[in-house]
């Protein structure tokens, strides 16, 4: 692979995302020889750190998270790191001159501006880059989620960033697209012959997409009160999984061909609005249970407000893709904090056999597990050994990536940062995708905010409120749970 010389400038470079995900991912890339020797990482923050301070911080906070088998490689990595203190939108220009000096003479390198900062900073920061003359033809910008809080705000951010960068230079991150199983879903569907002929409403009863987390939201209330599960997880991660599950086969493995097909799925989502919202969506909020606090009692710097009481930490939705392939097949989405397990998966539930000659069969089910352990399971019916009456038992044909492949499974951010440095936007969201997703989400948000009822409570450590089970139960279905 070509290793481009690059300067990676991270706004919010000392923040949580950077220290937990980006810096470790870059170290892995370095260790595996994917960074050119000249490549530098320049963290920007208001922190007033020197390069040495920042290297010390990374040494103290990141070294323990990654495998350091060769101290020389770790040292080489630390030497790539720089820090610039900057006050975005502020009066003090000295940070900008420091950045300008650092980048001067390196215009031929790929220049990546990674904005791991709140979305309101995206537009102003890009303008400042432009004013400082730092945007070169080889520049790219990476935008972290959330991209706005509704369609108009997303459009505004896209316009502001789009005034400085071309769409081909803009990389909108959804880290779920970097997960191994998610990319494997495309390989499973489009590099195997046996699935695609039955991947439609004739054979599939419904699809379930779950992202369950055990964590709560300690210390995040400031963000979460105004986000909620729908904006935090569904608008991006879950809808991305839905598009990859439902999309038509693209003609080529090519950035635009794949994204064209994904956007068509989003455009085909049947709108849920007004009175239907109560029937097709569920929202919940966790309450204290055992030693786990409720959402309103999570440690936070401010007391809970009306927004805290109204925000959903769990949501379940019955979606539908209105096209020839999928009409009539429900896509159930669910995500929540403080559930009993951490598990993200896509479950494709097939229909029952057209005519059964045995008692006791259950329909086939394909489970794609994203985490904790990446794997694919096809639940099939088998005969239980024995000389008596034929007795059926569902058993999994199971592929565990961990057991099948010896290579380390890279973290999502590693794959995505590698793609940004290589200039490949296939696994990033195009403007029309993000906006189509918001167009579907907004009417749900509107109906929820017009509804005087609060989210249904569910005790921390459970699988969500009763409504989530009724959403499937009323058509005789149930959420996939571990047997
Ligand atoms: C982030 C959300 O995008 O995804 C978090 O903001 C959530 O609230 C996280 O915890 C989940 O990511 P993962 O990779 O742990 O499933």
Image: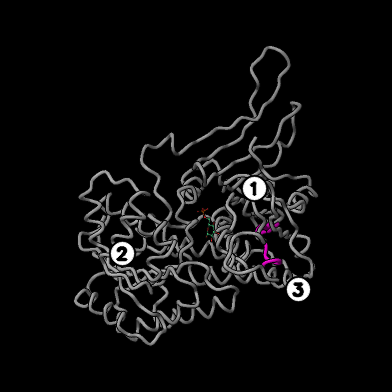
Q: Position of residue 49 (x, y in %)?
A: 31, 70
Which residue is under mark 1?
A: 291
- Please give left or right for residue 113 compared with residue 30 in the image: right
Would you place residue 155 above or below residue 112 in this image?
below
Q: CA distance from mark 2 to mark 1?
A: 37 Å
Q: CA distance from mark 3 to mark 1?
A: 34 Å
Label 3 secondary element: helix
User: Between disc 2 and disc 1, whose residue precedes?
Assistant: 2
User: Between disc 2 and disc 3, whose residue precedes?
Assistant: 2
| Magenta-highlighted residues | 307-321
Q: CA distance from mark 2 to mark 3?
A: 47 Å
Q: Position of residue 118 (x, y in %)?
A: 49, 72
Assess whether residue 395 is covered by the magenta stretch. Answer: no
Would you place residue 189 above or below residue 135 in this image?
above
Instruction: Give me the residue at 56% from left, 57% from top.
Output: 247
Assess whether residue 319 is covered by the magenta stretch. Answer: yes
- Please give left or right for residue 376 compared with residue 23 in the image: right
User: Hey, which residue is sitting farthest top in the picture?
Assistant: 387
Would you place residue 163 above or below residue 396 in this image?
below
Which residue is under mark 3?
A: 450
Q: Position of residue 117 (x, y in %)?
A: 45, 71
Q: Which of 254 and 151 lies nearest the eye of the viewer?
A: 151
User: Between disc 3 and disc 1, whose residue precedes?
Assistant: 1
**Disc 3, disc 1: CB below 8 Å?**
no
Tag nearer the camera, 3 or 1: 1
Say the numbered circle drawn on residue 54.
Answer: 2
Label 1 secondary element: loop
Tag nearer the camera, 2 or 1: 1
Number of dots carrying numbers: 3
Instruction: Give me the residue at 21% from left, 56% from top.
Output: 76
**Disc 2, disc 3: CB below 8 Å?**
no
């Amino acid at each position: 692979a070509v290793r481009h010389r690059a300067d990676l400038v991270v706004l919010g470079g000392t923040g949580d995302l950077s220290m937990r995900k980006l810096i470790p991912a870059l170290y892995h890339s370095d260790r595996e020889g994917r960074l050119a020797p000249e490549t530098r990482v320049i963290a920007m923050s208001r922190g007033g750190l020197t390069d040495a301070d920042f290297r010390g911080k990374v040494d103290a906070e990141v070294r323990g998270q990654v495998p350091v088998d060769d101290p020389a490689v770790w040292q080489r990595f630390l030497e790539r790191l720089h820090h610039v203190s900057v006050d975005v939108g502020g009066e003090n220009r000295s940070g900008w001159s420091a950045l300008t000096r650092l980048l001067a003479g390196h215009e031929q390198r790929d220049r990546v501006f990674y904005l791991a900062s709140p979305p309101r900073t995206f537009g102003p920061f890009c303008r400042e880059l432009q004013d400082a003359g730092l945007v070169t033809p080889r520049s790219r910008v990476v935008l972290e989620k959330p991209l706005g809080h509704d369609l108009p705000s997303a459009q505004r951010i896209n316009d502001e960033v789009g005034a400085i960068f071309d769409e081909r230079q803009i990389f909108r991150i959804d880290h779920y697209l970097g997960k191994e199983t998610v990319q494997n879903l495309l390989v499973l569907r489009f590099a195997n012959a046996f699935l695609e002929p039955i991947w439609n409403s004739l054979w599939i009863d419904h699809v379930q997409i779950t992202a369950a987390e055990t964590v709560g939201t300690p210390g995040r209330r400031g963000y979460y009160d105004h986000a909620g599960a729908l904006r935090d997880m569904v608008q991006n991660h879950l809808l991305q999984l839905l598009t990859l599950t439902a999309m038509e086969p693209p003609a080529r493995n090519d950035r635009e061909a794949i994204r064209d097909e994904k956007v068509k799925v989003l455009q085909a989502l049947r709108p849920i609005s007004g009175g239907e919202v109560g029937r097709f969506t569920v929202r919940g909020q966790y309450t204290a249970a055992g030693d786990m606090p409720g959402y309103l009692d999570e440690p936070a710097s401010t007391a809970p407000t009306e927004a805290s009481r109204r925000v959903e930490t769990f949501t379940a939705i019955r979606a539908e893709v209105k096209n020839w392939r999928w009409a009539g097949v429900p896509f159930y989405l669910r995500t929540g904090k403080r559930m009993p397990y951490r598990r993200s998966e896509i479950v494709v539930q097939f229909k029952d056999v057209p005519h059964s000659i045995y008692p006791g069969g259950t329909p086939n089910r394909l489970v794609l597990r994203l985490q904790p352990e990446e794997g694919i399971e096809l639940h099939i019916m088998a005969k239980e050994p024995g000389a008596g009456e034929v007795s059926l038992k569902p058993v999994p044909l199971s592929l565990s990536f961990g057991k099948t492949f010896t290579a380390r499974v890279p973290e999502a951010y590693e794959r995505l940062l590698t793609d940004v440095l290589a200039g490949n936007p296939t696994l990033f969201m195009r403007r029309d995708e993000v906006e189509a997703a918001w167009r579907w989400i907004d009417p749900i948000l509107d109906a929820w905010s017009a509804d005087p009822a609060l989210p249904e409570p569910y005790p921390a450590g459970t699988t969500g409120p009763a409504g989530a089970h009724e959403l499937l139960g009323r058509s005789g279905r149930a959420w996939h749970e571990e047997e």
